[in-house]
């Protein structure tokens, strides 16, 4: 094994080594693609079914540098760095931004970026694993203030309401004179740009030249970074030296390739603030999770869609159990109540059932096809609704501090969705000392396994769990 040279750029790192060593790296850093067997290319042996993270010509994404070097250290390979990045350092560590003082964990999160080195390389890139209610807008504003005044920052967000909220909050923190945007309301260039991913993507060809001028990129909800939209944007930001992903649910995809793509662009986790941390520190509300019987009667052959339709959406037994939990919360005065469903038809069905059961309460529903959904959501947010039945569109970025009870009727097998939904209920408010969360244990080859996975998520988050199911 000869000397390995790593020529480091912002986006890509060139690996100069022998063909034998290059092949060893390619084989080590590859991941099988789920469902590859069903591809014609795989069946005809044109493709081996793997995604490779070191190319034939010896390039890899720079975010993988620590992981690749760890492997070479374990193998006792000799290697050296040639750093071709145009690096810069921070000026200060802000303990206050605008009129807000940084909490200790927020300060540590910012420091984890500003002071991050890999070996002797300044490496201000990676993922900040910050749970809902951690104050990501303040962290973003602090990073902007920390670096020199000639550096430009772009903050990519995924949802319109997150964009609106971030534009307002960050503008107040850093000053409107520094604030720019790309969104549904147009384009305004400035040193700090908050941008909707969809708006950038729709204009990517005309914006590409401007995007190369940004030195710092922050990506909210970075678990989306493996999607085609985000990938296109992030590749266009190829001159950014500082690269930070923000999410309360990074690296939680069941598809390992999606996690590896996130790591490839940003790098490893730099700092973590868990739900348990925020609850213990008094910044989030303590949840009590009750797991009740969902369906117990379903007997369906191993067909996921049939199970989901008959055992969850159209199951009178399960929908009745959901309704009973809503009734329990109404009786205990845990209003307002949020009921989460997965599909539009299930959302509307549960709305009709809840409305019929509680004719004297203020009740409404939303999903993406409801035209005035933002107005309805605002009514729920300020306490003008007693019960809101919603699809999963509400799962990210919404600040809903009044929620007294959350009933998750959606089922599902996504760790990311579970944590995002629960995050809506953990917001702190003087009206509540704890929040009540309901989920269900279902029967069925798929639904039962999905239920167990969700219960495991609650256990990993160290939530108090009351198990009332019998199956």
Image (cartoon, helix red, strand yellow):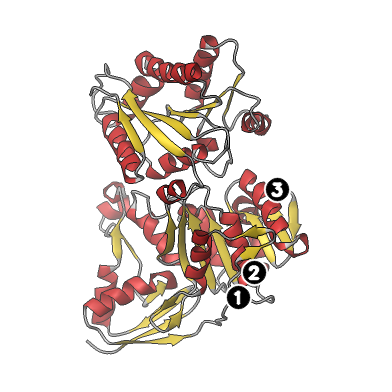
Residue visible at 22% across and 82% down in the picture: 76
* Gap in angstroms between the C-alphas marked 3 and 2: 26 Å
Residues at marks 1 and 2 touching, judged by CB atoms closer than 8 Å: yes
**Image height check: is 9 above or below 359?**
below
| Residue annotated with mark 3 | 184
**Residue 178 appears anywhere in the view:** yes
| Residue annotated with mark 1 | 92
Select label 3 or label 1 by which is in front. 1
Q: Quadrant of the N terminus?
A: bottom left
**Image height check: is 28 above or below 343?**
below
* Gap in angstroms between the C-alphas marked 1 and 2: 8 Å
Other residues around mark 3 within 10 Å, as few (<14) / some (14–19) / many (≥20): some
| Residue annotated with mark 2 | 145
Other residues around mark 1 within 10 Å, as few (<14) / some (14–19) / many (≥20): few
Q: Earlier in the sequence, mark 3 or mark 2?
A: 2
Residues at marks 3 and 2 touching, judged by CB atoms closer than 8 Å: no
Other residues around mark 2 within 10 Å, as few (<14) / some (14–19) / many (≥20): many
Spot occupied by residue 418 in the image (x, y as percentages of width and height): 41, 39
């Amino acid at each position: 094994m000869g000397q390995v040279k790593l020529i480091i750029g912002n986006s890509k790192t060139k690996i100069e080594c022998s063909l034998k060593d290059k092949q060893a790296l390619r084989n080590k850093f590859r991941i099988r693609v789920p469902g590859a067997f069903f591809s014609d290319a795989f069946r005809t042996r044109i493709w081996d079914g793997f995604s490779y993270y070191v190319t034939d010509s010896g390039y890899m994404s720079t975010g993988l540098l620590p992981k690749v070097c760890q492997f070479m250290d374990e193998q006792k390979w000799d290697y050296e760095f040639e750093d071709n990045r145009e690096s810069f350092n921070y000026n200060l560590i802000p303990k206050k931004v605008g009129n807000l003082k940084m909490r200790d964990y927020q300060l540590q999160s910012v420091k984890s970026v500003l002071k991050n080195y890999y070996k002797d390389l300044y490496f201000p890139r990676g993922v900040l694993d910050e749970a809902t209610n951690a104050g990501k807008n303040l962290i973003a504003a602090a990073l902007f203030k920390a670096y020199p005044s000639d550096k430009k920052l772009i903050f990519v967000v995924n949802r319109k309401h997150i964009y609106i909220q971030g534009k307002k909050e960050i503008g107040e923190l850093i000053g409107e004179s520094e604030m720019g945007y790309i969104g549904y309301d147009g384009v305004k260039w400035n040193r700090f740009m908050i941008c909707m991913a969809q708006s950038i993507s729709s204009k990517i060809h005309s914006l590409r030249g401007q995007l190369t001028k940004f030195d710092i990129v922050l990506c909210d909800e970075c678990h989306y970074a493996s999607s085609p939209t985000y990938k296109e944007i992030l590749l266009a930001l190829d001159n950014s030296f500082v690269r930070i992903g923000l999410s309360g649910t990074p690296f939680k995809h069941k598809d390992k390739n999606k996690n590896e793509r996130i790591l490839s662009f940003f790098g490893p986790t730099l700092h973590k603030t868990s739900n348990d941390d925020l609850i213990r520190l008094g910044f989030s509300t303590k949840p009590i999770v009750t797991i009740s019987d969902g369906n117990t009667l379903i007997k369906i052959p191993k067909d996921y869609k049939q199970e989901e339709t008959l055992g969850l959406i159209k199951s009178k037994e399960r929908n009745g159990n959901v309704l009973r939990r809503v009734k329990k919360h109404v009786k205990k005065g845990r209003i307002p109540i949020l009921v989460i469903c997965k599909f539009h038809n299930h959302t509307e069905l549960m709305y009709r059932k809840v409305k019929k059961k509680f004719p004297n309460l203020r009740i409404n529903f939303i999903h993406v096809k409801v035209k005035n959904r933002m107005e309805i959501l605002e009514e729920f947010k300020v306490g003008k609704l007693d019960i809101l039945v919603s699809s999963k569109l509400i799962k990210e970025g919404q600040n809903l501090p009044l929620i007294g009870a959350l009933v998750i009727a959606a089922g599902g097998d996504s760790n990311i969705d579970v944590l995002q939904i629960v995050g809506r209920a953990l917001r702190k408010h003087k009206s509540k000392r704890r929040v009540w969360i309901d989920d269900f244990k279902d029967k069925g080859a798929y639904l039962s396994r999905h239920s167990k996975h969700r219960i495991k998520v609650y256990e990993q988050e160290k939530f108090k769990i009351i198990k009332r199911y019998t199956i």
